[in-house]
Amino acid sequence: MSHQVTQNDLCIERGEGCFVFRHLFVFPIVHGFGTRMYNIYLTGDGERLRDREKFCGQLGINLDDLVCMEQIHNNNIVRVGAEHKGRGSKSDSDRITNVDGMITQAKGVPLAVRTADCAPLLFYDPVHEAIGVAHVGWKGAAVDLAGKMAMALKNNFLSQAEDIFVAIGPMIRSCCYEVGEDFHEMFGSHVERRGGSHYLNLAGVIMEELERAGVRKDRIYDSGLCTACNKDLFFSYRREGPETGRIFAVIMLKGDTV
Ligand SMILES: [Zn+2]
């Protein structure tokens, strides 16, 4: 299972079914994303909670601390603090509602984003020691959530865009992401024509938004992994339907005791 991902020179396996970005591993943060070995989607049974616990355990994070958000395909971002620790970690009932992005400067507060085909983005500013997560599908891309995240880090923590690292986890890619012809109007050259069909390069849209916000191209690490192609590794909403599982991508500033 791990073979396909370890071929990718940006991502390395750390623990079973759990991957980190090679270039971010050197910083005082904990981060990573899971594979379908861990279905963290909280519908139905308690098995999912066990998967959450196991995934967090692989990273060295306490599930009790994890902060989860509702994710409604919008561009609302919330600033999280130590007082939010554990929100949505074990139940959706107390997760942070009405947002698709979270930022914090609080140490030891892990932020989580859950995805099947949408893009999980991890943000890290090593200068001002700030982090963020975002959940970006085409709707979030249409309202510049990625660029807005860089602005939110600036407005809240004085982050300079050129200092920020962004990691793009597994997501559906243009090889598999068929869309309607009307997407040309929204995303221009990021929609590719093949045969009689149209395919969205969502990662390309996100990277353009980040660069427009001032993030350096060489600080954007794209896993390049397609959730729809790699059916042994990831869940895919497109391939498997809305009831498919979800993976977590997580980032946390290391605290004094971590
Ligand atoms: Zn694909």
Image (spheres, helix red, strand yellow):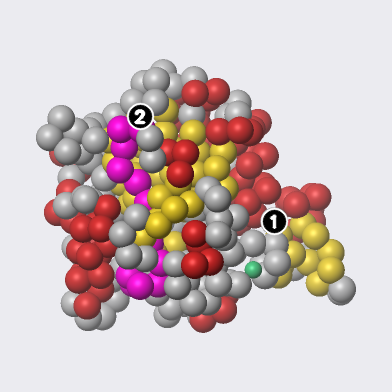
Distance in Å between CA atoms under marks 1 and 2: 28 Å
29 drawn magenta: yes
Which dot marks residue 132?
Answer: none
**Label 2: few (<14), some or many (≥20) within 10 Å?**
many
**Residue depicted at x 67% and y 67%:** 177
For this orientation, the residue located farthest to the right is 195
101 drawn magenta: no
State the extent of the magenta-drawn residues as a range.
27-39
Residue at which label 1 appears: 201
For residue 90, which quarter of the picture?
A: bottom left
Q: Is residue 239 left or right of residue 126?
A: right
Assign the N terminus to one quadrant of the image.
Answer: bottom left
Tag 1–tag 2 contact (CB < 8 Å):
no
**Residue depicted at x 36% and y 65%:** 17
**Residue depicted at x 55% and y 33%:** 219
Q: Amino acid at mark 1?
A: Asn
Residue 103 locus on image (x, y percent): 36, 36
Residue 25 locus on image (x, y percent): 38, 40
Residue 244 locus on image (x, y percent): 43, 78
Q: Above or below — where is 168 with respect to 165?
A: below
Residue at which label 2 appears: 130
Near-viewer residue (200 or 138): 200
For residue 179, which quarter of the picture?
A: bottom right
Where's ligand 1: which quadrant? bottom right
Q: Above or below — where is 47 with respect to 184?
A: below
Assign the C terminus to one quadrant of the image.
Answer: top left
Q: Amino acid at mark 2?
A: Ala
